[in-house]
């Protein structure tokens, strides 16, 4: 049977991708940020998961206002890196896992989460920057990736509670898949940032760190934080953090099992307009 | 009964909700068109003529021509869509963010390197933080950018 082995949480700032692609990782501005992910890359290459279930949001790339799905799962065989207006990032195509993705879709829809199925969509920095941070710059990504896009652009995003419960359903779906696959689930976006209006540039370090504490120790309580607290305290784009609760809900302790181990925790300000947070939680008995 | 909107009293912040999305539909769809290189070229060659192909309001068109993102947001634009305009001009996201604060790019970058904008005084309209209306503009920058 397939199993969930770990969850990874990280911001997905586009400027991080631009710094990597432009060879700027050793510049004084960027060095501390990339240093914070060195351990993560080593851990990831040791782990060698078969599939990463990658929760992210599309930034008006694949989805215009013509179509705004709240939860969209990529069931296709491959996904092209998008041209977001500056040209596509020079990163590999993303290979999907259509069999597991379709299985998860069928399972969680029957579990009352109404997903949109997507066989063709370009994937933007929300998905490719986390892959670059965890895998470096390989000629092909080392595992299959199931893109899972959450609407956080058009208000309201799904509630934290809904995201947490969806994560629990995704765990049940993965565990009912017959093939013995190791699956990681990643939650991306955040942390505090605001990209619009006179309040642009908002950073709230104490709120962010409290969020990380609670994500580790009290995810169910954290999932009850209302939208307007995210916006007020962590900026209008800080609401992306609800996506981290999907990954956290897929850990064993949300299903009555053991608490995961904290493998790595990192926090850095700033990357362009954004506070960068990062956490790796590994299952004790996957 | 009207929907509750508990986010309307946050200073310097416009939440892109269903009402804003309805107002800004064509403005944002125009922005999406700039994802294609051929459309970027046509827009840059004759901005007004390209805008006139879209059923946008005059205020929306002016906001685009002036690269005034605060005006664009007020008329229903969303920052992720509007960012395509800056990308078309070859500007970074940080440059665009600075333009909405009244800071120059350097002033804004310095604020971020110093830890960003504090939430203190910026949580509720009527406090005295830097994002409050009576504190605008925040630096020596102009709205928009050279293009």
Image (spheres, coloured by chain):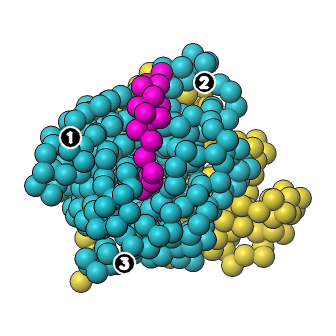
Chain colours: A cyan, B yellow
Left or right, residue A251 beside residue B36: left
Q: Where is residue A252 in the image (x, y as percent from the top left)?
A: 19, 51
Q: Please give the range of residues in magenta.
A: A35-53
Residue at 44%, 68% in the rendered image = A101
Q: Distance between the residues labelled 1 and 2?
A: 33 Å
Q: Callout 3: 10 Å neighbours few (<14), some, many (20+)?
A: some
Circle nearer the N terminus (1, 3): 3
Residue at 70%, 55% in the rendered image = A83
Identify the residue under disc 3.
A106
Identify the residue under disc 2.
A25
In magenta stretch: residue A48:
yes
Above/below status of A219 relative to A274 = below
> In the image, which disc is placed on residue A284?
1
Question: Does label 2 lie on the same chain as label 3?
Answer: yes
Q: Distance between the residues labelled 3 and 2?
A: 41 Å
Tell me the subunit letter for badge 3: A
Quarter holding the N terminus of chain A is bottom left
């Amino acid at each position: 049977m397939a199993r969930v082995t770990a969850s990874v949480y990280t911001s997905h700032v586009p400027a991080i991708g631009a710094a990597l692609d432009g060879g700027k990782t050793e510049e004084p501005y960027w060095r501390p940020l990339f240093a914070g992910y060195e351990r993560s890359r080593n851990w990831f290459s040791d782990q060698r998961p078969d599939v990463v279930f990658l929760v992210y949001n599309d930034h008006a790339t694949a989805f215009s206002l013509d179509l705004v799905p709240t939860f969209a799962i990529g069931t296709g065989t491959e996904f092209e890196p998008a041209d977001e207006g500056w040209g596509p990032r020079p990163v590999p195509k993303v290979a999907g896992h259509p069999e597991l993705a379709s299985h998860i879709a069928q399972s969680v829809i029957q579990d009352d989460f109404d997903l949109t199925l997507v066989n063709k969509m370009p994937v933007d920095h929300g998905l490719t920057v986390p892959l670059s941070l965890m895998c470096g710059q390989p000629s092909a990504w080392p595992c299959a990736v199931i893109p899972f896009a959450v609407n956080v652009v058009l208000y309201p995003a799904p509630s934290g509670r809904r995201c947490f419960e969806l994560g629990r359903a995704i765990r049940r779906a993965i565990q009912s898949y017959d093939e013995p696959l190791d699956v990681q689930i990643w939650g991306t976006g955040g942390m505090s940032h605001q990209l619009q209006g006179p309040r642009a540039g908002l950073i709230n370090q104490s709120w962010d760190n409290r969020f990380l504490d609670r994500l580790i120790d009290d995810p169910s309580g954290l999932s009850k934080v209302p939208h307007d607290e995210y916006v007020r305290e962590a900026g209008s784009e800080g609401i992306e953090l609800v996506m981290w609760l999907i990954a956290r809900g897929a850990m064993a302790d949300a299903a009555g099992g053991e608490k995961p181990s904290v493998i790595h925790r990192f926090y850095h300000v700033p990357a362009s307009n954004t506070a960068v947070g990062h956490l790796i939680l590994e299952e004790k008995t996957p | 009964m009207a929907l509750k909107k508990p986010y309307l009293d946050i200073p310097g912040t416009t939440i892109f909700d269903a009402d804003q999305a309805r107002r800004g539909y064509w403005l944002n769809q125009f922005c999406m068109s700039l994802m294609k290189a051929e459309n970027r070229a046509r827009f840059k060659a004759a901005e007004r003529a390209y805008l006139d192909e879209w059923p946008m309001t005059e205020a929306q068109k002016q906001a685009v021509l002036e690269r005034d993102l605060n005006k664009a947001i007020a008329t229903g634009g969303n920052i992720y869509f509007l960012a395509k305009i800056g990308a078309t001009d070859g500007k970074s996201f940080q440059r665009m963010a600075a333009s909405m604060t009244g800071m120059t790019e350097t002033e804004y970058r310095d604020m971020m390197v110093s830890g960003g904008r504090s939430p203190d005084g910026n949580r509720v309209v009527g406090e005295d933080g830097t994002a409050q209306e009576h504190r605008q503009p925040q630096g020596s920058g102009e709205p928009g950018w050279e293009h």
